[in-house]
Image (cartoon, helix red, strand yellow):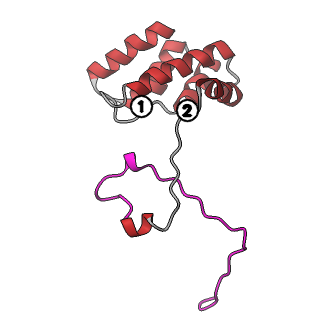
Amino acid sequence: RTGEEIIAHPDFMLVISYNPGYQNVMKGLKPSTRQRFVAMEFEYPLAERETVIICQESNIDKDTAKKLVSLGGDLRRLKDYDLEEAASTRLLIYTAKMIKSGLNAREACLSCLAQPLTDETETLAAIERLVMTYF
């Protein structure tokens, strides 16, 4: 059907997720494109809320979820120093799911949090020491 006009419903809304930190010069949105959207910035949930989210999404116990949230907060503070990316709620949920499935908590943290965030030997060792303070 070429040449026919498509009319969007009045309630139609297009929502896109754009993480500028992941972009580089070759892949960034042009200013003229960015200007066509309303920008909203989201912070991480408060610790209590993030704990609830992790419990609901992974069925992990609250104590373990709290430890993961605290660890995630510590890792997020490292973002401006050694890590290019932060420990997302999604990574914390993946970690919780691995723990719930029976993987040792330290191994789950290293596999699901540390290794996705960096491949630098010294940074991995620092994260491992941090993980050991929680698990």
Circle 1 SS class: helix
Circle 2 SS class: helix
Q: Is residue 28 magenta?
A: yes
Residue mark closest to the camera, 1 vs 2? 2
Image side of residue 108 versus residue 85, left or right: right
Q: Is residue 78 above or below residue 18?
A: above
Do we see residue 86 in this rendering? yes
Residue at the far bottom: name it.
3
Image side of residue 104 versus residue 76, left or right: right
Q: Amino acid at mark 2?
A: Thr
118 or 77: nearer the viewer = 77
The number of callouts visible is 2
Q: Residues within 10 Å of mark 2 (few under 14, many from 20)?
A: some
Sequence order check, earlier mark of 1 and 2: 2
Q: Is residue 20 above or below residue 118?
A: below
Q: Position of residue 112 (x, y in %)?
A: 48, 26
Image side of residue 59 versus residue 107, left or right: right
Q: Residue at x 44, y 63 (%)?
A: 34
The range drawn in magenta is 1-30
Main SS class of the magenta portion in the image: loop
- Looking at the rendering, which quadrant does residue 44 occupy? top right
Q: Position of residue 75 (x, y in %)?
A: 42, 24
For disc 1, the marked residue is 116
Quarter that holds the N terminus: bottom right
For disc 2, the marked residue is 89
Q: Residue at x 45, y 13 (%)?
A: 131
36 or 108: nearer the viewer = 36
Q: Residue at x 53, y 51 (%)?
A: 40
Q: Residue at x 39, y 61 (%)?
A: 29
